[in-house]
Amino acid sequence: MTADLDYQEIRYRLENYAVFKILRKESAAFMLGFFHDQFKRRHRADIPQSELVAALGAFQEFARIGAGESFAPRDPQAYLDEWANDGFLRKFYPPEASEARYDLTPDSERALEWLAELSGRPFVGAESRLLALFETLRDLVYGAAYDPEERKAELERRRAEVDAELGRLERGEIGRFDETRILERYYGAEDAARRLLADFKQIEQNFRDLDRETKERVIASDRSRGSVLKEVFEHRDAIVASDQGKSFSSFWAFLMSLDKREELTGLVARVLDIPAVRAAQKSFPLDSLDSRLVGAGARVQAMTHRLNEELRRFLDEGARREGLRVGELVEAWKRLALVCREDPPRDRDFMELDGEPELGLVMDRPLFSPEEETVIGERPEAAGLPSVGIDALYDIDSIDLGALAERVNALLAGAPQTSLSEVAGRFPVTQGAAEILGYLTLASEEPSGAAFGPERAEIAARNERRGAGLVVDTPDPAFLPEAEL
């Protein structure tokens, strides 16, 4: 937004925003050139530390060819540490990994985007942008309309356009885009895909900031757990209920639809097969868009799961500390009683307790009410004797979660994702509803690389040991190859 951009606001942003600090840095060209070479040109989200150190050393040697031997004299690891401390790179350790990895921060992404926009395009797609603006305004007007007649008229207008298009096709009047219109729209698709992935950096950073603030509140706060959790949940709910949070939830639900993902992959493949597009100079690999969107969305989901895990550990640690504190107080009272056993205090007030006393008077207790005796005169004839023994409680199926995980990973080896219904179709259920419950357990554990959506499925579950079968109506979670099950 450009509102209220007066002199003071512009000066404040130029002096305090990290993206301007990047551009003002003396070694900005060296740093951003390396970032672009490793992350943007190679289209990588994060890079291991050892690999990035080696790449920076080679980049230094290449830069010294034109700038002199004294250029960038420091050790590569020192540069990476400096950039990470300044907030230009993010250094992190993945779960169950001993080597650090680096990725770009949202400010570095924005700086690279600004520099890329300065290079310009061979031509500016004015027509496609105008049509996109026109369609957006039309959808906004009629999508927000409360008058049913107005919306009905718009739908009839669209139907008339479709009928007219069908009539032209039947008459052999086929209109096709020329090469200029094709490239105009293709470059627009590249820009939209690149900006979408860059936006995920900011969304992920927002959830990461929430995670860090949660840890800081937990460590520094001396308040009760209830008050800390209330503040944390209010902050989290505010992010989820914000426009950005709602937009991401809708995006993730769309992406978890296998039909939509297959349609997206098919459309990209057909676009890249157009002769004009094949010959065009490309700046973004659209063929990897699906996997990169899933990866970016999964990282945001992982931040949410990490926040939940942090809150759970906070509750467990608080309960443990309270138990230890009670034990210490009891032991202290025992030691005091042992010391005072031979010479008890003679003063009326010998100890002070913090807080107001809670009195439990005798008359505050309810009076005793004797239970009414129940007399059974005769045995009901219809009830009879119990016919089911307790042996059925021990007749259960043992589910091997490791074997179930191997089945899921086998399907993920040849597909970007799979679902519970697909796994059950490939590997029929032979241990009844307990086996389906095992798959749901795998999907709910963290880190599982799975996502629950609104989809449900009816799965045939046969128990071969008992010779019985049933149809189970169950959630149909999507398993993703983001983490090994």
Image (cartoon, rainbow, N blue to C red):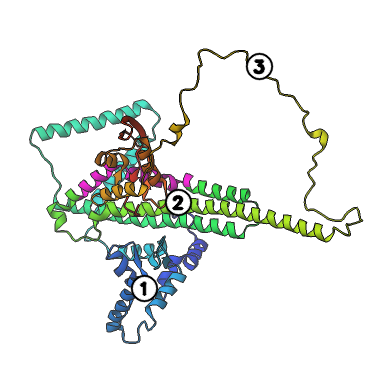
Q: Which residue is found at the position 52% from the left and 63% from the top?
A: 8
Task: Kindly report which numbered mark, 2 or 3, lies closer to the viewer in this rendering.
Answer: 3
Give coordinates of residue 145: x percent, y percent.
Answer: 39, 32
At numbered mark 1, what does the secondary structure look like: helix, strand or loop?
A: helix
> Which numbered disc, 2 or 3, marks the residue that appears first in the sequence?
2
> Which numbered disc, 3 or 1, marks the residue that appears first in the sequence?
1
| Amino acid on which the number 2 mark rests in the picture | His
Q: Find disc 3 in the rendering and name its residue.
A: 375
At numbered mark 3, what does the secondary structure look like: helix, strand or loop?
A: loop
Tell which of 276 and 258 is nearer to you: 258
Dot 2: few (<14), some (14–19), or many (≥20) neighbours within 10 Å? some
Q: Quadrant of residue 174?
A: top left
At numbered mark 2, what does the secondary structure look like: helix, strand or loop?
A: helix
Above or below for 164 versus 209: above
Above or below for 106 versus 376: below
Dot 1: few (<14), some (14–19), or many (≥20) neighbours within 10 Å? many
Q: Find disc 1 in the rendering and name its residue.
A: 31
| Amino acid on which the number 1 mark rests in the picture | Met
Residue that lies at the very extreme toward the bottom in this rendered image:
69
Q: Which residue is found at the position 77% from the left and 60% from the top?
A: 335
Residue 26 appearing in the image: no
Magenta stretch contains residue 291: no
Give coordinates of residue 125: x percent, y percent.
Answer: 24, 53
Find residue 226 and name its label.
none
Contact flag, marks 2 and 3 (Cβ < 8 Å): no
Dot 3: few (<14), some (14–19), or many (≥20) neighbours within 10 Å? few
Magenta stretch contains residue 242: yes
Give coordinates of residue 95: x percent, y percent.
Answer: 42, 60
Instruction: Find the distance from the CA under tag 2 to the CA under tag 1.
Output: 33 Å
Q: Which residue is found at the position 21% from the left and 33% from the top?
A: 161
Q: Find disc 2 in the rendering and name its residue.
A: 305
Provide the residue span drawn in magenta.
240-268
